[in-house]
Image (cartoon, grey):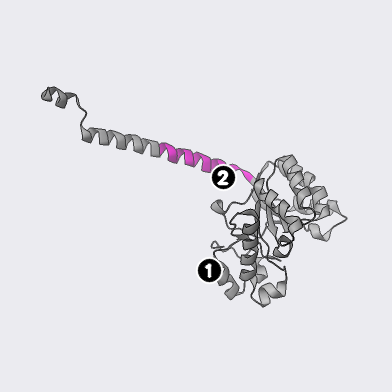
């Protein structure tokens, strides 16, 4: 009986080799799938709609329009407005509905942020407020007036990197704040500067932008763009300094 058992039982070594072969094959298949997904992503046109200076009286209406069109967006909010309890339900709603809320400083004051070197402390305070309100842990910030010239200051630049903050500027400036009564000009600005497969559109929580938002969404859909929302886990650099660490 012992002899028969030895002949019919599989060799432990052969079993291990077979398992390794199967694992290697599975890994190869996963790599190929990953390549296919990566290639698909490369071919996608992606636009990130971003809104600064909230929360505001218009935040809820922006969320309504985005929900109606099945689009997610990235919001950069100010701490002095986040402190207002009347706005906080919309901030919670934004993250609950799949939008990203990052920081746009406490004060939006150029002198305080850049001359007085308060950029990082203000951003950290704003991010802490967002966490307190929403439970999320964002790391993305947008410098008021852009990373140039503000973050060209070596001390501030180093502080941003040491703090682990990520920085997003934009590729398209709608200049919506400039034209409260000229929606055509805002739309022309967006259309004329849409040139890349990946675009990040700078807008603000303004009434004129809210009214134009369905038209902006329709334009990018017509151009074949998908709508992206920022993710800390899938960060990619988008700053005027061309610094891959930010």
| Identity of the residue drawn at 64% across and 54% down | 134
The residue tagged 1 is 162
**Residue 173 in view:** no
**Residue that lies at the very extreme toward the front in this rendered image:** 85
Badge 2 local density, few (<14 within 10 Å), some, or many (20+)?
A: few
| Identity of the residue drawn at 43% across and 41% down | 31
Q: Position of residue 78 (x, y in %)?
A: 71, 62
Q: Where is residue 219 in the image (x, y as percent from the top left)?
A: 75, 44
The residue tagged 2 is 42
Q: Which of marks 1 and 2 is nearer the N terminus?
A: 2
Quadrant housing the N terminus: top left
Q: Between tags 1 and 2, which lies in front? A: 1
**Residue that lies at the very extreme toward the bottom in this rendered image:** 116
| Identity of the residue drawn at 20% across and 27% down | 9
As rendered, which of 40 and 124 lies closer to the eye?
A: 124
Badge 1 local density, few (<14 within 10 Å), some, or many (20+)?
A: few
Q: What stretch is highlighted in magenta?
A: 28-45
Q: In this view, does 23 lie above or below 116?
A: above
The secondary element bearing badge 1 is classed as: helix
* 1 and 2 marks in contact (CB < 8 Å): no
């Amino acid at each position: 009986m012992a002899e028969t058992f030895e002949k019919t039982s599989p060799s432990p070594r052969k079993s291990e080799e077979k398992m390794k072969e199967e694992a290697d094959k599975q890994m190869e298949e996963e790599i190929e799938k990953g390549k296919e997904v990566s290639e698909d992503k490369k071919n996608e046109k992606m636009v990130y709609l971003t809104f600064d200076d909230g929360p505001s009286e218009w935040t809820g209406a922006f969320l309504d329009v985005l929900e109606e069109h099945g689009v997610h967006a990235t919001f950069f909010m100010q701490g002095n407005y986040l402190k207002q309890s009347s706005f906080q339900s919309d901030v919670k709603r934004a993250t609950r509905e799949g939008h990203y809320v990052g920081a746009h400083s406490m004060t939006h004051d150029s002198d305080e942020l850049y001359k007085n070197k308060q950029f990082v402390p203000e951003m950290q305070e704003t991010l802490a407020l967002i966490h307190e309100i929403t439970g999320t842990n964002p790391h993305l910030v947008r410098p008021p007036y852009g990373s140039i010239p503000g973050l060209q200051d070596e001390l501030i630049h180093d502080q941003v990197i040491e703090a682990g903050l990520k920085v997003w500027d934009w590729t398209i400036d709608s200049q919506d704040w400039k034209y409260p009564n000229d929606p055509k000009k805002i739309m022309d600005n967006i259309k004329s500067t849409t040139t890349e497969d990946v675009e990040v559109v700078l807008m603000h929580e303004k009434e004129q932008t809210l009214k134009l938002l369905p038209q902006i969404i329709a334009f990018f859909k017509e151009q074949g763009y998908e709508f992206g929302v920022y993710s800390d886990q899938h960060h990619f650099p988008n700053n005027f300094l061309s610094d891959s660490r930010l």
